[in-house]
């Protein structure tokens, strides 16, 4: 093949050899003779073959499950905790240049931070204040990974495993708290009932008729059962009052 025909083919092959395509969620970090020259993508771009090289970075949000960690809380209780981490690369150049393996670095940093933050809280706080611990953990890890061009979007404690002996102790404590609450409610009800009874007694003390009516009502309540025989003794004063109400013209005379 003649040289005039060979040169265009070599040039065309050289151009095609440098063509690259980056997806919408990818960015290419380009180095020319070992020096960073910039990022390319998404879409079609070209690099100089044999002189420039690239490293592609995925900028989508990644989900990483942190393996279960056995750690000790502030009140000396050994627990096992695992968590889930969401992060993404916001500065691809920093993720390549400033850290050797940003995925492994983020993972190890998150595991260490999880163990440290659990050690700063008591067991009750770990169980009841997960949202606060999650927020603190996210801020701590995000501050450390910011220089790597990585953004920590969310951290969630997934599960907390406590010893069986501690579970039984917590169950007894919860039962004691419920019993205490029930006794307090019962005592408050009895106090309120006694206050109402005292008020009713003072009210009936000024009216003998009201007292007799209450006694008759009580007897009627006792006699609801058909098998109950009730003997009622009616005071003479009550009889005289009833007679005077039925026959107002007849004077009331006391009975012996």
Image: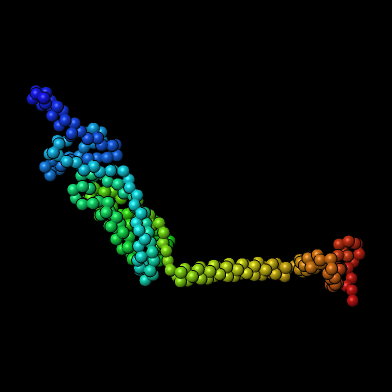
- Where, quadrant-wise, is the C terminus in this rendering? bottom right
Percent from the top left, x then y, of residue 119? 33, 66
Percent from the top left, x then y, of residue 235? 84, 72
| Total residue callouts | 0
Residue 136, compared with residue 48, is above or below; it is below
Residue 238, compared with residue 13, is above or below; it is below
Between residues 204 and 74, which one lies in front from this camera angle? Answer: 74
- Where, quadrant-wise, is the N terminus in this rendering? top left
The reply to whether residue 249 is visible in this rendering is: yes
- Which residue reaches farthest right? 250
- Which residue reaches farthest front? 1
Q: Residue at x 21, y 47 (%)?
A: 96
Percent from the top left, x then y, of residue 152? 30, 50
Q: Quadrant of residue 220?
A: bottom right
Residue 176, compared with residue 46, is above or below; it is below
Percent from the top left, x then y, of residue 106? 27, 54
Q: Quadrant of residue 190?
A: bottom right
The reply to whether residue 209 is visible in this rendering is: no
Q: Residue at x 46, y 69 (%)?
A: 164
Horizontal placement of 45 versus 184: left or right? left
Horizontal placement of 73 versus 236: left or right? left
**Figure coloring:** rainbow
Q: Residue at x 14, y 27 (%)?
A: 9
Q: Residue at x 25, y 33 (%)?
A: 43
Between residues 76 and 81, which one lies in front from this camera angle? Answer: 81
């Amino acid at each position: 093949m003649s040289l005039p025909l060979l040169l265009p083919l070599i040039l065309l092959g050289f151009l095609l050899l440098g063509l690259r395509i980056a997806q919408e969620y990818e960015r290419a970090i380009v180095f020319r003779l070992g020096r960073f020259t910039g990022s390319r993508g998404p879409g079609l771009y070209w690099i100089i073959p044999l002189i420039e090289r690239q490293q592609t970075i995925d900028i989508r949000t990644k989900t990483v499950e942190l393996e279960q960690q056995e750690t000790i809380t502030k009140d000396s209780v050994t627990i096992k905790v695992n968590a889930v981490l969401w992060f993404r690369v916001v500065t691809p150049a920093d993720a390549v240049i400033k850290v050797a393996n940003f995925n492994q670095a983020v993972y190890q940093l998150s595991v260490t931070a999880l163990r440290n933050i659990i050690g700063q809280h008591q067991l009750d706080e770990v169980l009841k204040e997960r949202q606060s611990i999650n927020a603190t953990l996210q801020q701590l890890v995000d501050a450390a990974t910011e220089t790597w061009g990585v953004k920590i979007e969310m951290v969630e404690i997934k599960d907390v495993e406590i010893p069986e002996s501690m579970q039984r102790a917590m169950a007894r404590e919860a039962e004691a708290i419920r019993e205490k609450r029930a006794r307090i409610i019962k005592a408050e009800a009895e106090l309120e009932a006694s206050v109402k009874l005292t008020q009713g007694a003072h009210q009936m003390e000024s009216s003998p008729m009201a007292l007799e009516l209450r006694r008759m009502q009580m007897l009627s309540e006792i006699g609801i059962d058909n098998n109950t025989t009730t003997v009622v003794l009616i005071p003479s004063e009550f009889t005289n009052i009833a007679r005077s109400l039925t026959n107002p013209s007849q004077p009331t005379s006391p009975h012996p």
